[in-house]
Each structure stands twice: as C-alpha cells, then as structure tokens.
C-alpha cells in the first residue's frame, strides 16, 4: 500500500518548509508541484490574483468550497484581519486529513475550520451550527458540476448578501459553463474575469469574481 500524492506533499512540506510560516509552506507546495508532482492547488499565478481580491475585500467570514490539501486555505487565512475566519468544506476524508495537518504545520488552525462532507449537506448547517450570518467571500474550487447548484443553495440559505464576493477557480479549464452563464447574465451579480493560467502549466485558465448586488 503506497503513499498518496497528498501524503507525499505533506511529507515534503514537513521536511522543506518552516513550521509556523504560512508563506514558507505555500512556496514549498509550489516547488513540490513544479519539481515533483503536479497537484490541483490554485497555484502561485492564480494565487496572486486571489491574494489581491482577498486583501481588497478585507473579509471577516470566508467560505471555501474544496479544501484539497489546504493550499488556498493558507493563502486566504494568512491575509485575514484579526478575528477573521475561514470555513472550508472538503468531501474527501483523505484530503481533509492531510489538509488539517498542513494547516496545523503552518500554524493557522485557529483561523481555519475544515468541515468534512458534501457541500450540499454542510451549507444548510452553516448558520445554525457555526453562527454565520452572511459570507463576505466565497471561494469556489471544488467539483465543476457543483459550482452552480451550490451557489443557488447558498442564495436560498441566505448566506449571500449585498456585497458578498464569489471567486470561482477553473472557469476556463476544466471550465464551468453553466456557472459562468448564470453569474454573467444574472441582474443580481456584477462579474469580472481575471485571465491567468492553469496551476503549474501554460494552459489558459482564470478566476471569475462576481459581486452580489442584492
Ligand atoms: O477537481 C478540481 N477541483 C478544484 N480545482 C481543480 C483544478 O484547479 C484543476 F486544475 C483540476 C484539473 C484536473 C485535471 C486536469 F487535467 C486539469 C485540471 C481539477 C480541479
Ligand atoms: Mg481549482
């Protein structure tokens, strides 16, 4: 029974990065993905755009759909103001287990809560179980077929309010056409595409930023 790619990524982080230093962990994961094994983190190029969007919004409550190994959780949480919180949902228990260890290694566990299970089940629990009113930012980076249904569920649950910013990864590759059509044609959203590249590759991809207008 060999190791998994997430397990190899965790080992590489523990051997090559500085414990308690999120920037060191982030850059170490990028080196692992460029020099050892490609992995589906948002990456350093789209990551810089994500950083800028997070800083501009200065959010208190961020929801992430799709944790994987926790790379974008670190990118987001390291930029939160004091008291800011990130809730991140992961369907795959093996991924969640690794993500929690990478988050702990980086020293950001006090700002990040990893919620395990299907987002469709977890989203309706957010208000009551985690005392969340509205999300300031929602980073959508899980399974492309879930982007649109989960966005509609978040609206129905009252978790998207005036000014809530949706940031979606992979809108060009692998592509999320139904989601894009929805946010770009809805009178309730103002959308903007940030052209970039698929993580650790030369293929085009980008982030879609959509602000809820109320
Ligand atoms: O499933 C995914 N969830 C979230 N993000 C992804 C991603 O950023 C990818 F590049 C990819 C991806 C996987 C295989 C490819 F050949 C290209 C992109 C997948 C995901
Ligand atoms: Mg992605």
Image: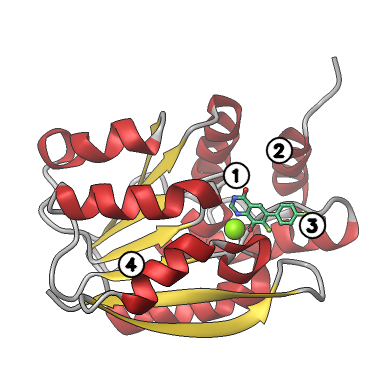
Residue for badge 2: 6
Residue marked by disc 4: 80
Observer-nearest residue: 7 or 93? 93
Q: Ligand 1 falls in which quarter? A: bottom right
Q: Earlier in the sequence, mark 3 or mark 2?
A: 2
Residue 78 in view, yes or no: no
Q: Quadrant of the C terminus?
A: bottom left
Q: Is residue 20 left or right of residue 2?
A: left
Place of residue 113 in the rendered image (x, y in percent of width and height, measured from the top left): 35, 41
Disc 3: which residue? 33
Task: Report if the CB atoms under discs 2 and 4 are less than 8 Å apart.
Answer: no
Residue 41 lies, in percent from the top left, at 64, 56
Q: Residue furthest right?
A: 35
Relative depth, front residue between 17 and 56:
56
Q: CA distance from mark 4 to mark 1?
A: 19 Å
Mark 3 or 4, nearer chain start: 3
Which residue is outermost to the top? Answer: 1
Residue 69 numbered tag: 1
Q: Secondary structure at mark 3?
A: helix
Say what secondary structure mark 1 lies in.
loop
Report whether residue 153 is seen.
Answer: yes
Does the beta carbon at disc 1 come under 8 Å from ligand 1? no
Disc 2 to disc 1: CB gap under 8 Å: yes
Residue 11 at x, y = what percent? 75, 38
CB atoms at circles 3 and 2 under 8 Å apart? no
| Whether residue 41 is situated above or below residue 132 in the rendered picture | below
Q: Mark 4 or 1, which is nearer the eye? A: 1
Residue 96 drawn above or below residue 174: above
Q: Are marks 4 and 1 in contact (CB under 8 Å)?
A: no
Residue at 54%, 60% in the rendered image: 22
| Label whose residue precedes the other's in the sequence (2 or 1) | 2
How far is disc 3 from disc 4 in space, using C-alphas? 25 Å
């Amino acid at each position: 029974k060999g190791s998994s790619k997430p397990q190899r990524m965790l080992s590489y982080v523990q051997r090559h990065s500085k414990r308690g230093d999120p920037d060191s962990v982030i850059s170490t994961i990028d080196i692992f993905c460029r020099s050892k094994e490609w992995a589906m983190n948002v990456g350093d190029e789209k990551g810089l755009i994500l950083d800028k969007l997070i800083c501009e919004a200065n959010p208190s409550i961020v929801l992430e759909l799709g944790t994987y190994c926790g790379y974008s959780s670190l990118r987001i949480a390291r930029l939160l103001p004091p008291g800011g919180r990130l809730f991140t949902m992961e369907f795959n228990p093996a991924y969640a287990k690794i993500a929690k260890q990478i988050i702990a290694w980086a020293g950001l566990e006090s700002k990040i809560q990893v919620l395990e299970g299907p987002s469709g089940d977890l989203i309706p629990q957010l208000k009551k179980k985690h005392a969340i009113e509205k999300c300031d930012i929602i980073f959508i980076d899980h399974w492309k077929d879930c982007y649109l249904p989960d966005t509609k569920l978040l609206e129905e649950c009252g978790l998207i309010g005036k000014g809530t910013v949706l940031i979606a990864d992979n809108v060009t590759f692998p592509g999320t056409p139904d989601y894009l059509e929805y946010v770009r044609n809805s009178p309730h959203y103002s959308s903007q595409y940030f052209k970039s590249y698929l993580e650790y590759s030369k293929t085009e991809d980008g982030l879609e930023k959509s602000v809820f207008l109320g």
